[in-house]
Amino acid sequence: MTTDYTIAAESDNVFLDLGFPEAEAQNLLLRSDLVIHIRKVIDKLGITQAEAAKRAGITQPRMNDLVKNRTHKFTLDALVNIAAQLGYSVKL
């Protein structure tokens, strides 16, 4: 038995497509994108989570939350501050 599936994206924001209200969907998308960027920065710098946490001014368990994509534990402001502490600016 085979089943045909059709997948269609309605927008470029998966959170909006999942039914989140527009403002919340935008915030979730920005936070998700920023976490991905910060993780890439850490990889590019070739540093450990502990070193990244020290540079960002947060605890290592908090950095672990970020690396493990626990975006719900971070505000957009907190993520912008972490990126800044790692030497990067954020532009929307």
Image: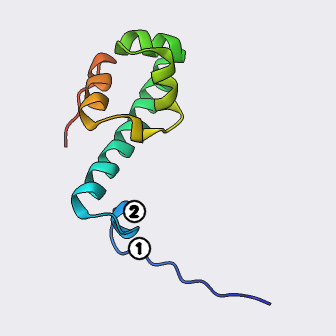
Q: Residue at x 37, y 61 (%)?
A: 15
Q: Residues within 10 Å of mark 2 (few under 14, many from 20)?
A: some
Q: Position of residue 23 (x, y in %)?
A: 21, 57
Quadrant location of residue 82?
A: top left
Is label 1 in a helix, a strand or a loop? loop
- Tell me: residue 68, above or below residue 49: below
Q: Residue furthest right?
A: 1
Pointer 2 and pointer 1: residues touching (CB < 8 Å)? yes
Mark 2 element type: helix
Is residue 14 depicted above or below 53 in this figure? below
> Residue 35: horizontal and vertical position, in percent?
40, 37
Q: Nearer the viewer, residue 70 or 44?
A: 70
Q: Which mark identifies residue 9?
A: 1
| Residue 61 location (% of width, % of height) | 51, 20
Residue 47 seen from this side: no
**Drawn side of residue 81 relative to residue 69, left or right:** left
Q: Is residue 66 left or right of residue 6?
A: left
For the C terminus, the quadrant is top left
Residue 92 appears in the rendering: yes
Q: Amino acid at mark 2?
A: Val
Outermost residue on the bottom side: it is: 1
Instruction: Where is residue 12? Give x, y as percent.
Output: 34, 64
- Real-space Cα separation, disc 2 to disc 1, in angstroms: 8 Å
Q: Nearer the viewer, residue 89 or 13?
A: 13
Residue bearing mark 2: 14
Question: Residue visible at 46% across and 31% down?
Answer: 66
Give the residue at x 35% y 34%: 74
